[in-house]
Image (cartoon, helix red, strand yellow):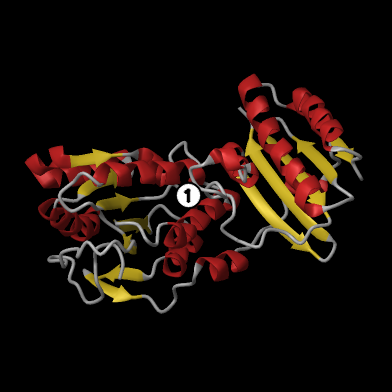
Amino acid sequence: MVGGLRPGDVGAAPAAVDGAGQHTHAAAVIGSSGEALAAAVPFMDAGLRAGDLVVLSCSLERNDLLRRELGARATDVQTDARISLLDTRAPDALVAIRKLLEQAAGSRSGRVRLVGETRFGLAPRDWREGQRYESVINTLLSAEPIDALCFYDRRSLPAEVVDSAAATHPVLLVDGVARPNPHYLSPPDYLARLPLPREPLEDGDPVFAVDDAPVLAALRHQLAAALATVVPDREQREDLHIAVSEIAANAFRHGGPPVSARLWAAADRLVCTIRDRGTGYGDVLAGFQPAHGADLSRGGMGLWLARKLWDHVDLLPSPDGLTVRLSSALR
């Protein structure tokens, strides 16, 4: 059951959400404004009638289109661009969703109903982050009272991204009917199959390299000095250093020697790797939210901070240990 649309529901008259608390997550592949309206308006209308907190997180043009169709009822619809990864990374998008859930607790139904359109970006490395996000929310929000309908516009998205909707959504909305999706993959299965190609910068000489770092403090200091030479924006430089320092701390604390680090830089991009002899993270969902929930005093924030502060974080296990690769565009 996904997106407030139960298998067999017709888009023109979706079944009322039963308020059972289960997260539901559907995808609609569209190719026109008419298809977007046909999929979303009945879904939103049902939410408004049920007393849900209805939220839009699409492109500005799509939000305007849907609001015009709703007419006066649009005043009861909120907008939050963070959920679609607009200038936001997945951990902060999840924080935004949880704040909406807190707000919805005071609504008549206690549920959030979301129409979204994830911003996948232009390059394959950017697509991966959106694809990961669409997958992990199936587990991270599985017990939450939120119904989500996600648009995939075949006119603007690469075919590979459109095809990924079937792997990350348990139900697809096809010709106005919600259908069980036999191609859906659980997040562990999907993330394990997601390709992680080498960053092109890694084929050149690093601007910084250290092998078998003796102690964490020294490595942190060396990384700070290296970042100072290649990251011109002070705020970004500090953010990147905080995150990579946390990954280095994890390597010393949980991985084991030798711990090595590499840094590659171009005028517009930075790649950093931290490698240790550990076996890696046991949970493929690690880092999308703090390991110990809202209680940040308990720690467990290293990978979460990395996902918050770097554009891309890849976990690359091998027989020799684990490499955490971080990369970001430079401001």
- Residue 182, given in percent of the width and then of the height, sits at 41, 79
Q: Is residue 119 left or right of residue 103?
A: right
Depth check: give the residue in front, 191 or 201. Answer: 191
User: Residue 270, can we see it?
Assistant: no
Q: Is residue 107 left or right of residue 308?
A: left
In the image as oriented, which residue stretches furthest toward the bottom? 182
231 over 28 or under it: above or below: above
Task: Classify the position of the N terminus by image quarter.
Answer: bottom left
Q: Is residue 279 left or right of residue 258?
A: left
Q: Is residue 138 left or right of residue 209?
A: left
Q: Residue at x 72, y 50 (%)?
A: 324
293 over 189 or under it: above or below: above
Amino acid type assigned to the residue bearing label 1 in the image? Phe
Residue underneath mark 1: 120
Element class at badge 1:
loop
Q: Residue at x 63, y 46 (%)?
A: 303
- Residue 90, given in percent of the width and then of the height, sits at 49, 46
Q: Residue at x 37, y 61 (%)?
A: 143
